[in-house]
Amino acid sequence: MSAGVGSAEDSREAVAEIVRTHLRDIPDFPKPGVVFKDFTPLIADGPAMRALVVDIAGRYAGRVDVVVGIEARGFILGAAVAYELGLGMVPIRKAGKLPGETFKESYALEYGHAEIEVHTDAFLPGQRVLIIDDVLATGGTAEATAALVERAGAVVTAIEVVLELAFLEGRRRLGDRDVNAILTV
């Protein structure tokens, strides 16, 4: 869609449709009974990826100082959005993957437990942060990431996800934080 043509709602719906048509379900991954929502077809399609990145960046231009990408798929989208906004990106990594002093947070996944970390010096005090990930499921990863960002002295401006699995009610764990999902199923 060209700039200035159609409403913001039309644009949001168009991007949601791009996401919908580029996701694929992978049954029994990473364990039996789980249906994994794979977004690699979306990032493999240049025009689709560009539309997604421009949509997200447009929502947060001038509102954030840094982008956080959650390992691993959040790195891909977070880096692209940070680039589009002309900002830096801070990675949130699985425990033991960062070389410096870190803050650590444990949390429950829909299919297990995990720990994530961020460098203690990753943010300036009061920096406005956009957290990006691919899927909001039970909310454990997003909640733990927000806790890390806040412990490191920054402010969570918003949490942006490509896909929200509404039936898992992950949004409830995020309190009154601004959460946006491109597509909700």
Image (cartoon, rainbow, N blue to C red):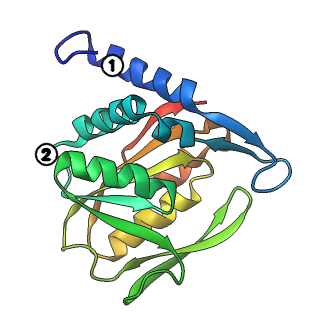
The three-letter amino acid code for the residue at tag 2 is Gly
* Identity of the residue drawn at 31% across and 32% down: 55
Cα separation, mark 2 vs mark 1, equals: 20 Å
The mark total stands at 2
Residue at image mark 2: 62
Q: Position of residue 175 (x, y in %)?
A: 46, 52
The three-letter amino acid code for the residue at tag 1 is Ser
Secondary element under disc 2, as helix, strand or loop, is loop
Q: Quadrant of the N terminus?
A: top left
Q: Earlier in the sequence, mark 2 or mark 1?
A: 1
* Identity of the residue drawn at 68% across and 69% down: 113
Q: Nearer the viewer, residue 117 or 37?
A: 37
Q: Please, is residue 151 above or below residue 89 in the view?
A: below
* Identity of the residue drawn at 70% across and 55% down: 110
Residue neighbourhood size for the residue with mark 1, other residues' Cα within 10 Å, grouped as few (<14), some (14–19), many (≥20): some
Q: Quadrant of the C terminus?
A: top right
Residue at image mark 1: 11
Q: Position of residue 20 (x, y in %)?
A: 55, 26
Q: Please, is residue 130 above or below residue 152 in the view?
A: above
Q: Please, is residue 29 above or below residue 55 in the view?
A: below
In the picture as drawn, the residue positioned furthest to the top comes out as 6
User: Quick check: 44 left or right of 35?
Assistant: left
Q: Which mark is residue 58?
A: none
Residue neighbourhood size for the residue with mark 2, other residues' Cα within 10 Å, grouped as few (<14), some (14–19), many (≥20): few
User: Quick check: 156 left or right of 185?
Assistant: left
Q: Nearer the viewer, residue 79 or 155?
A: 79
* Residue 92, quarter of picture: bottom left
Is residue 63 at least partly visible in the picture?
Answer: yes
Secondary element under disc 1, as helix, strand or loop, is helix
Is residue 177 at least partly visible in the picture?
Answer: no
Q: Position of residue 128 (x, y in %)?
A: 22, 59
